[in-house]
Amino acid sequence: MDLFNSSKDKNLLPFDGEVNYYGSLINPKKSQYYFDRLFQNIQWENDKAIIFGKLIITKRKVAWYGDKPFKYTYSKTTKSALPWTKELLELKEIIENQIGEKFNSCLLNLYHNGDEGMAWHSDGEKDLRKNGVIGSLSFGADRKFSFKHKETKQTVSVYLEKGSLLVMKGETQTNWLHRLPPTKKVQKPRINLTFRIIEPR
């Protein structure tokens, strides 16, 4: 597996997509502030997925926020977006100013420790803008994040630091899978925010 750290000017994927890692945009003290506020104030709930016709409830917790009560369906379950909190609006503005994009929604994930992760998948749900930008902010524990090309199976990985921003765009979701691999080395929680663009049908 190819581990890398790179500048925001370089595409981290070798082909068929575009991913930029900006590193820590938010200093450690402010990152801890946002982690605490999100941990306490977000309306977290266990994620649900229907796999092979069976309802699975995850240890990982999720929340869905947006400009409007957007419907978002993935893993055969549908969520309705909650109104933005003060902190989410602040963070949305930070990354919009950084990358020059506008977002209208955010999916949040709370991983209690390294045992909890995310399997290989791509964010290609029909509710999302096709080839739209996804901005991913991380708080709490540093975790490895991996990509795998759907055809060649080539993989690349990066360690996401607290307060850091990762941006996926172009044909990344069409051609690449990504995951948060579980690890026994991490005992602390992590909160991840993925700002997205919903295009209501």
Image: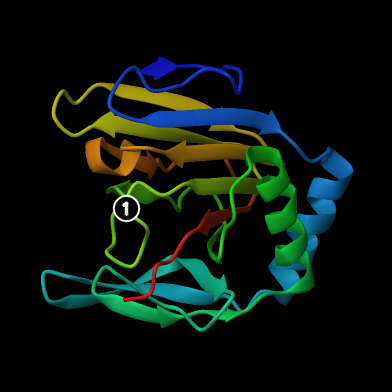
* Neighbour tally class for label 1: few under 14, some 14-19, many 20 plus, Cα within 10 Å: some
Residue drawn at x 84%, y 56% is 33
Side of 120 relative to 136 (left or right)? left
Look at the numbered disc 1 and give the secondary structure of its residue.
loop
Q: Amino acid at mark 1?
A: Lys
Residue drawn at x 34%, y 17% is 14
Quarter containing the C terminus = bottom left
Q: Is residue 143 visible?
A: yes
Residue drawn at x 50%, y 26% is 158
Residue 90 position within the rendered picture, expressed as x and y whole percent measured from the top left: 78, 60
Q: Is residue 10 above or below residue 101?
A: above
Q: Which residue is mark 1?
A: 130
Q: Nearer the viewer, residue 129 or 64?
A: 129
Query: Splitting the image into 4 quarters, where does residue 37 fall?
Result: bottom right
Residue 155 position within the rendered picture, expressed as x and y whole percent measured from the top left: 30, 24
Residue at the right extreme of this rendering: 29
Q: Nearer the viewer, residue 133 or 161?
A: 133
Quarter containing the N terminus = top left
Query: Splitting the image into 4 quarters, where does residue 52 fall?
Result: bottom left
Side of 48 relative to 88 (left or right)? left
Residue 134 position within the rendered picture, expressed as x and y whole percent measured from the top left: 48, 48
Side of 142 relative to 163 (left or right)? left
Side of 26 relative to 57 (left or right)? right
Residue 51 position within the rendered picture, expressed as x and y whole percent measured from the top left: 18, 68
Query: Splitting the image into 4 quarters, where does residue 39 fall?
Result: bottom right
